[in-house]
Amino acid sequence: MSRSTKIMTILTGTAWVSVYTGLYRLMTLLVSIMAARLLDVVDYGKVSILQSTAALFIMFATMGLGTVATKLVAESNQKYIKSITFINFVLCLSAAIGLFLGANWIALEVYQDASLSILIEFLSAYIFFSGITQIQSSILAGKEDYAKIAKVNLYSGILSIVIVFLAIKQFGVAGWLLGLSALEIGKAIVLQLIIRKMYTSVPQRMSKKIFFHVSKLALPIALSGFFILPINWFLTKELLLKNGYLDVAVMNISDQWVAILTFFPIAIGNAMLPIMSKMRASAERKDMSDLALKINILFSTLICIPVVLVGEFVLKLYGDSYTQHANIFYYIAPLVIILSLTNQLNNRVIADGRPALMMYSNLLWSVVCLPVSFYLIKAKLGVVAILIGRLVAYLVKLLFLYSYTRREPAA
C-alpha cells in the first residue's frame, strides 16, 4: 500500500467518524451551554456532579466492551455480536440497580448533599440506556458503518436541544436528566433496529467459547478503565468538598472542551482501529499507526492554538460567573495534543492484541495523576490542580506507550 493510499484510507475512514463524533459533541456542547445559562451556578454544578457519577457507572456498565466490539466485529463480522450484547445487557442492568440502591448513601456520605439523592436515582435509568447505546455504536463502528451512527446522533442531538431546553425550563436539574434519559431510550431502540436489520443471521445460541473469548479481551480494557475514571470521579468529589459547585462546574466545562478539541484526532484513531485490526503484518500496522500519529499532531496543534486566545469569550458563553477561570485553556491545549496521540497508541495496542499493555499504562497514569492532583487541590489551585495532574500523567503514559511501539519487531 503506497503512502498516498494509506493517507486516503485514513481520511476516508475518518470522514464519517468525524461527522458522527463532531455533530454529537457539538450538540452536547450546545445543550451544556444552554443548561449553564438556564441554571444558576449551584444547579449547574449539580449537573456536573451527576455527569461525573454517570461516567463512573457507565464504565462499570460497558467494562471495555466498546473497543472489543469494534475490533471483533471488524475481524469476524457478526460472530461475536450475541455474546457482546448479552454481556452488555447484564452489566448495564447491574450498574443501574447498584446506583439506584446506593443513591441515598452516595448523596449523603460522598457528596454531603441530600438534594442529590433523588437525582442520582433518576440517573440510574440514564446509565442503563447510555451503556447500551455505546456498545451498539461500537458494533456498527466495527462494521465501519459510520454513516448510520452519524445520522442517529445528528437527529438525537437536534432533539436534545429542544427536549432538554423545555425540560430544564419546567423541572430544572431533574428536567435535564429526564430529557437526556428519554433521548438515550429512543437512540437505543433505533440502533437496535439497525443492528437487527444488518445482522439478520446472528446465531440464536451463544457459544461458551465465544463468551469467554470476549470476556478475556474485555477484562484488561475494563481494568484499565478502573485506573482512570474512578480517579477522575474521586478528584471531582474532592474539588466539590474543597472549593464548591462553581469549581466543579468549571471542571465540567473544561472536560467538554477537551472532548470537542479532541474529536477529530480521536476520530482518526477510532477509524484506524478496524483498519489496523484487519492487518496481519505488525510492520504494516506500525507504519499506518505512525502516519496517523503525524496527522494527529498536525490537526490537534492547529485546533488548539486559536482556542487558547479566546478562552474568556468561550467561558462567557456559559455565563459571567465562569470567566474568572479563563486560564484553564492554557492547560487544556497541551492536554488535548497529548490525549490525541495517546488515543492513537491505545488503538495500536488493541489492534496488536495487547489490551493488557493498556491496563499497565493506565495504572501508571493513576499512580502519577492521583497524588499530583490531590496535592495541588489541597494547595488550593482548584480546577487547575486536576488539569496539571492529568497533563503530567498523560505525558508519562504517552512516553510509556510510545516506547512499546518503538520496541515492537517489524514483522
Image (spheres, rainbow, N blue to C red):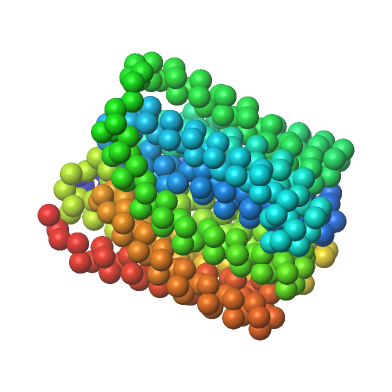
Residue 245 drawn above or below residue 158:
below
Q: Position of residue 343 (x, y in %)?
A: 41, 56
The structure residue drawn at horizontal position 49% and vertical position 39%, both measured from the top left corner, is 91
Answer whether residue 105 is visible to the viewer in this image.
Answer: yes
The structure residue drawn at horizontal position 37% and vertical position 59%, both measured from the top left corner, is 359
Residue 385 drawn above or below residue 81:
below
Q: How many marks?
A: 0
The structure residue drawn at horizontal position 18% and vertical position 52%, both measured from the top left corner, is 282
Query: What quarter of the picture does the C terminus occupy?
Result: bottom left
Query: What quarter of the picture does the N terminus occupy?
Result: top left
Q: Check the image and name the residue furthest to the bottom.
A: 379
Nearer-the-camera pick, 354 or 1: 354
The structure residue drawn at horizontal position 55% and vertical position 46%, both measured from the top left corner, is 58
Residue 258 drawn above or below residue 131:
below
Q: Check the image and name the residue furthest to the right.
A: 170
Q: Which quadrant holds residue 153?
A: top right
Drawn side of residue 239 relative to residue 213, left or right: right
Answer whether residue 154 is visible to the viewer in this image.
Answer: no
Q: Position of residue 83 (x, y in %)?
A: 37, 31
Nearer-the-camera pick, 282 or 249: 249
Drawn side of residue 323 relative to residue 197, left or right: right
Residue 263 drawn above or below residue 17:
below
Nearer-the-camera pick, 361 or 112: 112
Drawn side of residue 60 relative to residue 323, left or right: left
Q: Position of residue 157 (x, y in %)?
A: 65, 36
Q: Position of residue 311 (x, y in %)?
A: 68, 66
